[in-house]
Amino acid sequence: MKSAQLYCSACDREVEVMITEAPLLDGPATLHDEEVVCLAIGDRCTGSLCPIGAVEPNAMVARLVRNGLPTGGLRTVDATCPSCGALAEMVLYGGGRACCTICGTSARWTVDHPEPLA
């Protein structure tokens, strides 16, 4: 993967992106081409469609998870994924959505009860 700094018109600033490698094999199966993965996705992102990767935030988070990129800069919570049923780290992003770091499925995120202050 290659790292680059690109201007994001949704955030109105420079953001760090990773450009994935294209598959080495050329076969009959449908293979992904190179993808741009924005590392600034999350609360700081204000767009409903990423102008850099031309996808919605849930697809960008799925790219992040699929490519095994670190989620350290994103807000996460440990929760049971409604899709795969595993206790997983869920990446929170705009619009009350979360993405499972195990299966990559997007789901609505709500808080049923406030957590007590420690």
Image (cartoon, helix red, strand yellow):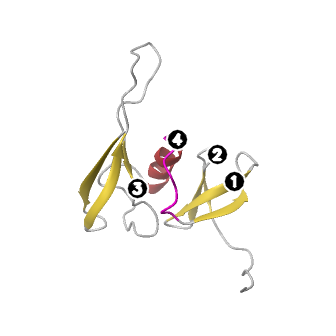
Asked if the residue at tag 1 contacts the one at tag 2, i.e. Cβ–Cβ closer than 8 Å, the answer is: yes
Q: Distance between the residues labelled 1 and 4?
A: 15 Å
Dot placed on the residue nearer the N-terminal end, 1 or 3: 3
Residue 116: which quarter of the image?
Answer: bottom right
Q: Distance between the residues labelled 1 and 3?
A: 20 Å
Label 1: how many residues lie within 10 Å, few (<14), some (14-19) or many (20+)? Answer: some
Which labelled disc corresponds to residue 88?
A: 1
Question: Which residue lies at the image location 24% right of the left edge and 55% below the top edge?
Answer: 6
Q: In this view, does 99 lie above or below 92?
A: above
Q: How far apart are marks 4 and 2 (CA)?
A: 9 Å
Q: Position of residue 103 (x, y in %)?
A: 63, 43
Question: Which residue lies at the image location 52% right of the left edge and 41% below the top edge?
Answer: 66
Q: In this view, does 97 lie above or below 66?
A: below
* Horizontal relation, residue 30 to residue 100: left or right: left
Dot placed on the residue nearer the N-terminal end, 1 or 4: 4
For badge 1, the amino acid type reads: Ala
49 in the magenta segment = no
71 in the magenta segment = yes
Dot placed on the residue nearer the N-terminal end, 4 or 2: 4
Which labelled disc corresponds to residue 66?
A: 4
For badge 2, the amino acid type reads: Ile
Q: In this view, does 32 lie above or below 50?
A: above
Give the residue at mark 3. 39
Label 2: how many residues lie within 10 Å, few (<14), some (14-19) or many (20+)? Answer: some
